[in-house]
Image: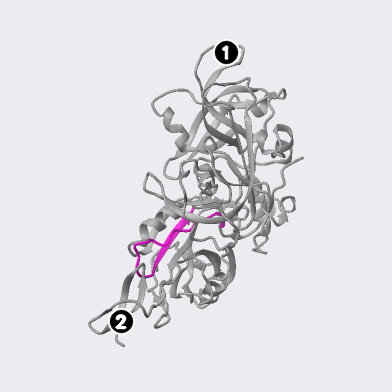
Amino acid sequence: MPTKIVVRNYRSAAAKWLAAAVWVFCGLTTAKASEKGPVAADPVAAICPVVYPLDENPSNKGYHYLFYGDAFFINEDGYLITAAHLMESFRDGGQLHVLVGLPSGQRRLLKAEVVATDWEHDVAVLRATPNPFEGGYRVAFLPLATDRLSPGKSVVSVSLRPSSLDEAYTFDEPLEDRSQGQVLSYQYTRTPNGREIELLLYSQRVIPGQSGSPVISEESGEVEGFIEGRWLHPTAIPFVTTTEQVDPSPGAAVRIHYAISLLQQNGIPWHATLEGTGLREAPVEKAKGFSGPTPLSLVAAPFPPQALFGGEILFDAKVDTRGRLTDVRVVQSQAPFLEEVLGAVETWSFLPARQDGRPVGSRIGIVFQFPQPFLPKLTARVHEYKETGTESKDRAALPLFTLEPEYPPTSIGEGSVILNEIVDREGHVTSLHVVRDLESLTAPTVAAVKQWKFAAGRRGGEDAESDVIVVVTFRRPAVASRTLPQANGRSCGVSMRGRCLFWQRP
């Protein structure tokens, strides 16, 4: 059965070219998908243990090997995704292999080339040689998710490991670990390389040997992330609001967003299932006019823990013809937010803009807003800017006036809302699409952003329609306490983490 590839219909004017763009971008045709291998009905067919053979000749048990973790196929060309830290043992030499299934149920060693790595976000792309999809192997691939699952949604983790880690042989049937859980929350943590990474936390304990295994949406069958086995210690879950009993050491998975970014940087196709309008309705050659870039995979940035007040970051960036974000110009920066924001946007990926059906480069505006995390607010928090880039032939639409959303007094949520706006040549917002929703915080965010004012973008020296990505990241407000200590006859008005942020007289 061919892979189902459809797209979300959120731009009526761009729905047709977007459908065709996804078809080309994901590298799929109906014939190719059905002839070389289907999307995995059972994820086990897509999963391969990552191993190193210890001898050159097999015994009656097959080859003796060391087991490191799992990888999974993401297309019919033999490419796989796994956790980069599994590659650390091979940095000084040694040929990596994967165990690929045969129709008989046995597994055979295939060499695996390391094609690309993102050490900061713990992602590696491998390629099995020869391509098992062109041989007599029992293999399939898994589609990758472009949307983030909401907390409470069901996920399944699937992994393969040898029955004995010390005496593992290729003729032995690997053990399958399959467990169902729920998405608990998304949490930022700092990797050993010093970069913030967003993890998906789910209600299942991770056991040794599961690194690199896929975590799959039970509803769509798409990979939401892969298991990050280095986070086996108890993890705090500050964002969980469920009343159900939660394992004190939940599973942690690297969001597949980071893998999609690495694949796009290296021009490697993958499969995706996007909901909405069917593809075959929209051949590329019939698309006319200009349509801006469409977000494919975006990740927000954490609210820096050392930040006592809010802030705002503005970028004017280019989305190139491969959908990568390039030439990021900092229009407004503010410490300590800039470093975290730059680390996030460098992983973003898009479907490129199109002119008469052809991919073209296009500039977009990017706004990261971190609302002041205090209650009560003395005045409405606004930001005003002067128009920039007036001499440039090409620039993005950028705000002249922004208003921070009010944090609802009944909310306990924190995290990010992401919006995609279209600003016309007059500087008016003509379309607003919620890319990432956050219960109780999306509505006040949209209400505030609707009051923003923009300077129009320019293309070829003329005012033109432009896209703007808005990311609003909330932190739970500090609340005034009457029990806090006094100093010189003054009491603390607002505190955060036990520290008084401003004093007031009684």
| Residue 58: mark | 1
Farthest residue, direction bottom: 506
Res 503 quadrant in image: bottom left
Residue 301: say if magenta.
yes
Secondary structure under the numbered disc 2 in the rendered image: strand
As drawn, 190 above or below 412: above
Taking the spot 36% from the left edge, 60% from the top edge, the residue there is: 338
Q: Position of residue 147 (x, y in %)?
A: 60, 55
As drawn, 300 above or below 425: above
Q: Nearer the viewer, residue 230 or 369?
A: 230
Q: Position of residue 52 (x, y in %)?
A: 50, 23
Taking the spot 64% from the left edge, 60% from the top edge, the residue there is: 14
Query: Does residue 226 appear in this view?
Result: yes
Magenta stretch in the rendered image:
294-319
Farthest residue, direction right: 1
Position of the C terminus by quadrant? bottom left
| Residue 491: mark | 2
Residue type at numbered disc 2: Ser
Query: Does residue 460 appear in this view?
Result: no
* Image mark count: 2
